[in-house]
Image (spheres, rainbow, N blue to C red):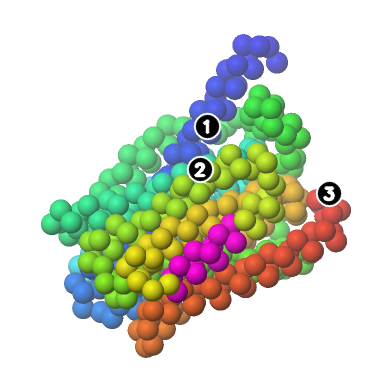
Amino acid sequence: MSRGSFLYTDRVTNLLLAIIYLAFISLGLPDSLLGSSWPTMYQEFGVPVSYAGIASMIISAGTIVSSLMSDRLTRKLGTGMVMVSSVAVTAIALFGFSTSHAFWVLCLWAIPYGLGAGAVDASLNNYVALHYASRHMSWLHCMWGVGASLGPAIMGAALSGGQSWNAGYGIISAIQVVLTIILFFSLPMWKKRPSEAAEVTEGASGDTANAPSTALPSKPLTLRQIAAIPGVKAVLITFFCYCTVETTTGLWAGSYLVLHAGFSRSAAATMAAMFYAGIAIGRGISGFVTMKFNDVQMTRLGEVIVVIGLVFFFLPNAALFAPVGLMLVGLGCAPIYPSIIHATPENFGANRSQAIIGVQMATAYTGSFLMPPVFGLIANNISIALLPVFLGAATVAMIFSHEALLRHVEKQPEQQLEK
């Protein structure tokens, strides 16, 4: 390749990386809206506070379905088209939320809301795991945290400005439409062969020149075949537990601050953003820390910080310490998800990573589907003050399952070379 061609390819590859960063912001924007707006929404709808779990379950069910389809969709459409289509569907669903004035209507719009998230999440995560260094995975998920922080901040500004929660969803929908247009015009860049992108990016940056092979199995792997791979069950439990912690915190932190810590609704919507701000800040820092520590060390560091954050919930004066705990739990969550995803090609083989990441996403969203509603029942029938206990139990289970995954990987190093 001539120097001019190399420089052109390098520019295209870096621009593609910038587009992926933008896509991750888009992924985060709607993820935290329901939790930050629900303290206002459920009163308007005239439904119990626990009904947030129903809407959350519908959204999560959609993401599970689309995640399981990600391997087939990416093979057929390519990562770029999956990304654009998913953001467009999400924009439409958010517009539907902004026009909803009855809970059953909200539930109908929650279906495309969820379908728009799963496939693009799995497809983009696998693309980055295969072709970019660990620091990019952390920084990209930092961009997700930026989007997830902006969502509640925009909703809080709308509520404190005298507007309805519908207006907050309308603003986010308009932003998603703009992002869809920008992403659409990036589609020609995705026609570039992934192996070239990996070579240029990693070689030019001085990182690992050994980009993983992207050769795919001739047919999509079945769930039975994926489950038979050593270590897969352990990593699926880890993702289930992680998403239990993240989504339960994101959904119920606002209500916890209102009903237990005594915050106003508008203040709680803004304070709940501290959790996602912690994730965004933590992933920004993690990108630099990954230059010294590997994926396993980053995951363990995050687990320790989550535990420390949960301790703050048990201290006296919830109004003072609960927001600090939220920030620390967010900081701890920051490296866990991207580190485990980035390790997937290394742990299970690059040629199987798209299928496995799709199932990992589906399992993570199953945690989102089941566990926030379970805590909703606990909050409705016992006390919302049990939130840190619930999160603590999920964190302990996550730590044990991750350690089990590492034991499987150590026993099966040759699986990286298997077809």
Q: Quadrant of the N terminus?
A: top right
> What kind of element bears circle 3?
helix
Q: Which residue is mark 3?
A: 417
Residue sitting farthest toward the bottom: 381
| Residue type, mark 2 in image | Gly
x then y, percent, for residue 64: 52, 64
Please state if 398 lies on the left or on the right of 404 as rendered: left
Dot placed on the residue nearer the N-terminal end, 2 or 1: 1
Q: Residues within 10 Å of mark 3 (few under 14, many from 20)?
A: few
| Residue type, mark 1 in image | Leu
Q: Which residue is mark 2?
A: 284
Please state if 149 lies on the left or on the right of 309 as rendered: left
User: Marks 3 and 2, Cα distance to the nearest angstrom?
Assistant: 32 Å
Is residue 303 shown in magenta?
A: yes
In the figure, residue 286 lies in which quadrant? top right
Q: Which mark is residue 16?
A: 1
Q: Which residues are magenta?
A: 302-314
